[in-house]
DNA sequence: ACAAAAACTTTTAGTCCACTAAAAATTTTA
DNA sequence: TAAAATTTTTAGTGGACTAAAAGTTTTTGT
């Protein structure tokens, strides 16, 4: 019934199952934490057997991983669109970067799920998580480094600054505040943003020692 | 047979079991990851039933939590001894702080276990972990803030710097590098130290914008 | 000093769920 | 129509966690 692209019927069916599984998982993750959901439940909503879920994604956090990978791709696109070619100064750059990251994460999943994601990214049980997160961090830092170089080119930042080092330092700083933002349900984005600004201002006084 | 301090026999027995359980857990955690160890195994070495382990510590990560709490207490003592009253400058302060933290953590447990600790501290399943880590962070940052004030008093840091903000910013920065150090088996303490120095140097150029 | 009570631990018996292996059934492909 | 690919069913295993009954040891009141 369907037009047969370059994919065989079998491949299309597989793709469909894959999509149904992560859609089911997403809907469940949002209404209950990772720990309160069974693979069985995901499988049932997706219309496949639980064994198939295991065969496709290996473990329960493997399913979460697939969800997150999708979200990451979008985040990088959004950053490219919203951040590029309007450099003001380095502090403003990081604050806007941070705002975009915070807003983006919450449009996909809520804090409790992101806590599980961050948690999985550091524990060693799921090496793929580790890898995915290393890559994401690398790409996010690269965005900052690129923007820092634009600032330099525009004369808005001293040429003496090492773009790579500064990019990673700024990334680490905002990431610390991001994790804190995610770890506390009561912490608002604006509070976190405020704290991050204070971090930057305080550190820039170091040179006066 | 034992002299009866202020504790009843029952309380002493309990204390003994508690101690035996965490000792058993520690020995097992070091030779295999958290995930490869059963409560049953811990109980057997400690000479109690598995139900008792559950009654005492609730969950498997509850046992780990108790271990970590002990290590934290020691870390704060070590910091007080090794760091205090020799302020040089703020960059050197943070690098020494970082060195002490890295060295201390590895004398107790290895990276794979600390990964589980960090992981547990952010996921929401074990609220006690969250609480313990918030407290530890607060105390560690306080150490830095106190030292920063000593630097100011000694004229080695501008009076215009906000000690609290600077303390937290520096703490966050070193903590990011600490997590990276723990997350990578191949990352050495000296590499991490080097990266941290670059972070600080890069950020101190911000003011020249 | 002794018996009853209180405080614990252990044993027992289960539940739940992730994860696995292999046989059976189904469906696409050739 | 036979072969290949893939899912489902079936059947387990392992281990965390729980509830409650049974057993043991300390405490306590007299």
Image (spheres, coloured by chain):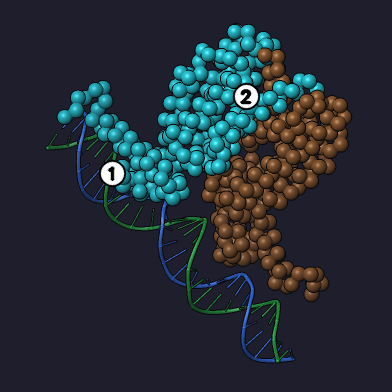
Chain colours: A cyan, B brown, C blue, D green
Query: Residue under mark 1: which chain is it in?
Result: A
Q: Which mark is residue B185?
A: none
Where residue B146 sits: x, y (%)? 79, 37
| Residue B180 seen in this snapshot | no
Q: Are marks 1 and 2 in contact (CB under 8 Å)?
A: no
**Residue, disc 2:** A170
**Residue ID at (68%, 24%):** A201
Could you say which quadrant of the image residue B12 lies in?
bottom right
Q: Is residue A180 above or below residue D22?
A: above
Where residue C4 sits: x, y (%)? 62, 88
Mark 2 nearby-residue class (10 Å; few <14, some 14–19, many ≥20): many
**Residue, disc 1:** A47
Q: Are marks 1 and 2 on the same chain?
A: yes
**Residue ID at (31%, 47%):** A44
Left or right position of A173 against A73? right
Left or right position of B11 against A80? right
Could you say which quadrant of the image residue A42 lies in?
top left
Left or right position of A155 against B87? left
Where residue A91 sits: x, y (%)? 62, 21
The local secondary structure at tag 2 comes to helix
């Amino acid at each position: 019934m369907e037009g047969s692209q370059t994919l065989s019927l079998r491949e299309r069916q597989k793709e469909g199952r894959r999509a149904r599984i992560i859609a089911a998982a997403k809907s469940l993750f949002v209404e209950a934490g990772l720990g309160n959901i069974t693979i069985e439940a995901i499988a049932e909503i997706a219309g496949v057997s639980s064994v198939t879920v295991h065969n496709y994604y290996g473990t329960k956090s493997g399913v979460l991983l697939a969800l997150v990978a999708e979200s990451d791709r979008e985040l990088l696109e959004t950053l490219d669109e919203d951040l590029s070619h309007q450099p003001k100064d380095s502090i403003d750059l990081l604050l806007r970067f941070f705002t975009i990251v915070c807003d983006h994460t919450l449009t996909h999943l809520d804090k409790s799920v992101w806590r599980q994601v961050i948690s999985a990214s550091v524990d060693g049980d799921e090496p793929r998580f580790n890898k995915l997160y290393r890559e994401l961090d690398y790409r996010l830092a690269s965005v900052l480094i690129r923007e820092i170089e634009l600032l330099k080119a525009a004369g808005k930042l001293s040429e003496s600054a090492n773009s790579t080092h500064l990019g990673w330092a700024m990334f680490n700083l905002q990431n610390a505040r991001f994790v804190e933002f995610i770890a506390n349900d009561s912490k608002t984005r604006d509070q976190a943003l405020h704290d991050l600004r204070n971090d930057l201002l305080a550190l820039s006084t170091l040179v006066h020692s």
